Amino acid sequence: MPVEGGSSSSSASAARHPKQKRKAHSLSIRRTNSTEERPPGALRGDMLEGQDSKLPLSLRNNLLDLFGQIEREFENLYIENIELRREIDSLNERLTGDGQTIEGGDPTKGALKTKASHSTSQLSQKLKTTYKASTSKIVSSFKATTGSRALCQLLKEYVGHRDGIWDLSVTRTQPVVLGTASADHSALLWSIETGKCLLRYAGHAGSVNSIKFHPTEQMALTASGDQTAHIWRYMVQLPAPQPTPDVSAPCDDDQDSSDREEGEVDGEGPCEVPTVRVATATLKSHQGVVIAADWLVGGRQVVTASWDRAANLYEVETSELVHTLTGHDQELTHCCTHPTQRLVVTSSRDTTFRLWDFRDPSIHSVNVFQGHTDTVTSAVFTVGDNVVSGSDDRTVKVWDLKNMRSPIATIRTDSAVNRISVSANQRIIALPHDNRQVRLFDMSGVRLARLPRSNRMGHRRMVCCSAWNEENQSCNLFTCGFDRQAIGWNINIPALLQEK
């Protein structure tokens, strides 16, 4: 690195000319002590004289400013230390005088000694506390804190895809399994407890961008880059559960980032598993990539969203196109259906999301919402009367279906937000980010936690999607990303809400 090269050359130069080094050092000290008489620009120039460095001048000035701030901080500590020592000496003198009056002799005897010792101890403790508080201001950003309890426990890692995973979902019927959709042209079904791959769907000729399960039957709906959406049936048998190791970590904002290389995944692809290659129904009315698909309530119709700027509504039984939903100015990014009503929300790169109402068969109304300034990556319904939208503008907004004029909460983040999900029971929003983070918020916009990300756990590339599973009195969160793996987390909701 250039910096290291510059440092070594400086050391070599200093070794060859020790006298010049001492001279430059003394000049630097003298000029530093006269800061009040010289302007800052001239001072920087003087301090840099005689120094052999390859750093740009602006960077060197910034470093000097930072070191100057540190020097001033410790100078304040030094002055405060002197004042405290003076207080200690003054107190000792007063105690000595009182001791001579009361005891008539040695002030180190009896109650006076105890009093002096106690007072000195208090001042010493104050001095230590002052040092600790002051120095913590400087190094607080380097310290990692841990919570008192494990809020998020790693459940299982699901490794087997040969390319990034775009989407994932959990079945709504027994047996409960995890489904993942990948750019490797396949969708996989997994045992949640063991992490074993149970079935592979290989009917698409392009990237599988979305997977959703039928509300009551063992059927899956996948959307693909081959401009089609497929409906296919599955039958799986869960393996016997295995004991899971205790690898828990607190949901804390100061976890270390991963040191592994991006894209590096432990393990190999899935072993030979049953493969489904033929779809029960193929929906192929789009003229572009089908980016997402979902079942309407009841499971008799599905909606698809495409890069051809349209969303299509199909009958499942006949594969017939019922409606084409047009109006977006750019490619669609996501679609979602309401869990109990015939409502559909679509999001687009045109910075808007649209609400489509099919509750009245004779009227199909649409409302357009412009709450974001960049691509709306997803918009989802909650069990209540809310819509939550996420965007590349680094915000997530919560809307009330009864009054969509303005959001009731806005969450601002430091990275673009991908496909979000909201837990049905606790109404907790999971935000997957481009910067590999996954954060949890409540519906009022209060941040609850961040999933651990360290050398042992967490994603190593962009996190694309999240999905909740709240079956069997437990709360699991699943995430997937471009590091070719999905991860399951066990979320301790009571502890999480108590930390709030």
Image: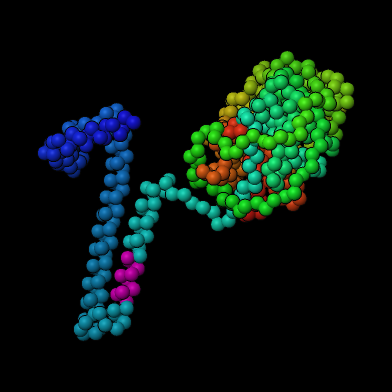
* Residue 425 in sight here: no
* Residue 20 locus on image (x, y percent): 13, 36
* Residue 129 locus on image (x, y percent): 37, 60
Residue at 32% x, 39% y is 66
Most extreme residue toward the front is: 272
Looking at the rendering, the stretch of residues picked out in magenta corresponds to 115-124
Which is more toward the observer, 263 or 256? Answer: 263
Q: Is residue 83 left or right of residue 300?
A: left
Most extreme residue toward the top is: 287
Which is more toward the observer, 53 or 99? Answer: 53
Q: In this view, does 281 lie to the left or right of 483?
A: right
Most extreme residue toward the left is: 19
Q: Quadrant of the N terminus?
A: top left
Q: Quadrant of residue 41?
A: top left
* Residue 66 in sight here: yes
Residue 440 forms part of the magenta stretch: no
